Image: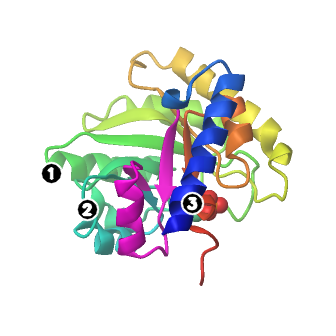
Amino acid sequence: MENIGRNLEIINENIGEAAYKSGRERSDITLIGVTKTVDVQRINHLVSLGVTNLGENRVQELMGKYERVNGCNWHLIGNLQKNKVKYIIDKVSLIQSADSFALAQCINNEAAKKNVVADILLEINIANEVTKHGITPTECLGLARNLEGFGNIRLRGLMTVAPFVENGEENRDFFKKMFDLYVDIRAKIVNNKHISVLSMGMTGDYAQAIEEGANMVRVGTGIFGRREL
Ligand SMILES: *Cc1c(COP(=O)(O)O)cnc(C)c1O
């Protein structure tokens, strides 16, 4: 528990420094505490320290924690299957991993049933890794335009999971590409006033991601320590 507080202090400091380098402030960056495999007690401790945006990558795990953690917003950050959308549609504040028209269609339908508007990010496979989900940068504008017809989806921005690297500097060019894509999408989508989120950067590379324009970072290991499997 003590570690969580100390780790968080360091991360907040690093975020502030990276934000400053890119002409912004700590308050311009949203930290998502990634809580996969972390127990509810430690998650509640993190929330008590002021981290109120939490990310889970599995629907089932999120559902199990949902009732037992209060005062937070949940983000779905992992691959989402169409048949599971109905379980989370009115529980999460942002679906960060939308990566196909069929999934978007399903999100729109389930959101309509519950009479909510679903905020989503499009997940981009920026390094074109076979092991990763997400659409290619080339597909992004087409899919973003197709979403404009959906009454129960609000496109909020883009997300990526960059390659796992030892040194975050190795991902800097991918982050630059993501920022360019984000600017481009915002310029080309007519109804763009809600497009304001660029989610990229994890424990190993969040500083570089922020320096290149991220305004949302997702950190797990850096807060809670290494995950036991
Ligand atoms: C696990 C995970 C993270 C956090 O990764 P860390 O390296 O532990 O900070 C961020 N984003 C996604 C999509 C994840 O699955």
Give the mark, 2 or 3, whose residue is nearer the N terminus.
2
Chain part drawn in magenta: 29-54
Q: Quadrant of residue 18?
A: top right
Residue drawn at point x = 54 percent, y = 32 percent: 142
Q: Say which amino acid is labelled 2.
A: Lys
* Residue 1 can be seen in this image: yes
Q: Are marks 3 and 1 in contact (CB under 8 Å)?
A: no
> Looking at the image, is 174 positioned above or below residue 73?
above
Q: Quadrant of the C terminus?
A: bottom right
The residue carrying mark 1 has its beta carbon less than 8 Å from ligand 1: no
Q: Any mark on residue 113, and which?
A: 1
Q: Are marks 1 and 2 in contact (CB under 8 Å)?
A: yes
Give the x, y percent position of residue 87: 26, 65
Read off the residue under disc 3. 223
Q: Say which amino acid is labelled 3.
A: Ile
Is residue 33 in the magenta section? yes
Read off the residue under disc 2. 86
Local crowd size for mark 2, using a 10 Å CA cut-off: few (<14), some (14–19), many (≥20)? some
